[in-house]
Image: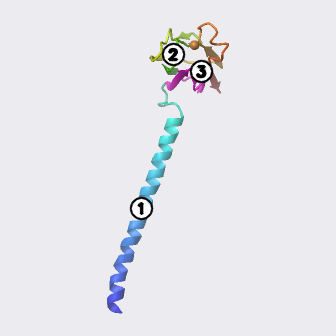
Amino acid sequence: MMKHSRTNRPTSLVSRRADSLAWLIIVAFITTVAYCAVLRGSPSHPPGGPVLQDIRITGMDFTPSSIEVDSSTPVVLRITNDDSREHNLKLGSGFTGPIYPGDSVVFDFGTFESDTQGWCTKAGHKAMGMVYDVFVRE
Ligand SMILES: [Cu+2]
């Protein structure tokens, strides 16, 4: 009887400590995963700096096809042309110039005062939906 309770007690203490350690690891893991998901979902944006968004061109689409920023945040786009044709983006006063198939360009379009639509200037592309929107929030 004595022997039984002596061996039992330390065991339950150890397992309780292991339990809380396991919970700590699980919570830390979930926090990390959630944080990474948030980072991946939104464009990277160091405080006070420009926002950088990755865009892919496939067919007649920019993906994603819009961004929301405040009027003090410069918009920098990294545009990769995954299509087989040449494209470009004219947005506000900025123009990327030709983006050839397989190429990737980084362009700083600066800040925007109000909602602005940009588009690809190649003949017919805008009409086929090749537009990109900057939405300026208050
Ligand atoms: Cu185009």
Q: 10 Å neighbourhood of mark 2: few (<14), some, or many (≥20)? A: few
Please tell me in which quadrant of the rendered image residue 111 appears: top right
Q: Which residue is mark 3?
A: 61
Q: CA distance from mark 1 to mark 2?
A: 51 Å
Which residue sits at x=48%, y=49%?
31
Q: Quadrant of the C terminus?
A: top right
Answer whether labels 2 and 3 touch (C-beta < 8 Å).
no
**Image-based side of 109 in relation to 1, left or right:** right
Secondary structure of the residue carrying tag 1 is helix
Please tell me in which quadrant of the rendered image residue 14 appears: bottom left
State the residue in front, 16 or 137.
Answer: 16
**Total marks drawn?**
3
State the residue in front, 90 or 113.
Answer: 90
Q: Which mark is residue 84?
A: 2
Q: CA distance from mark 1 to mark 3?
A: 46 Å
Magenta-colored span: 50-73
The secondary structure that dominates the magenta segment is strand
Which residue sits at x=53%, y=10%?
95
Q: Is residue 9 placed above or below 28 in the rendered structure?
A: below
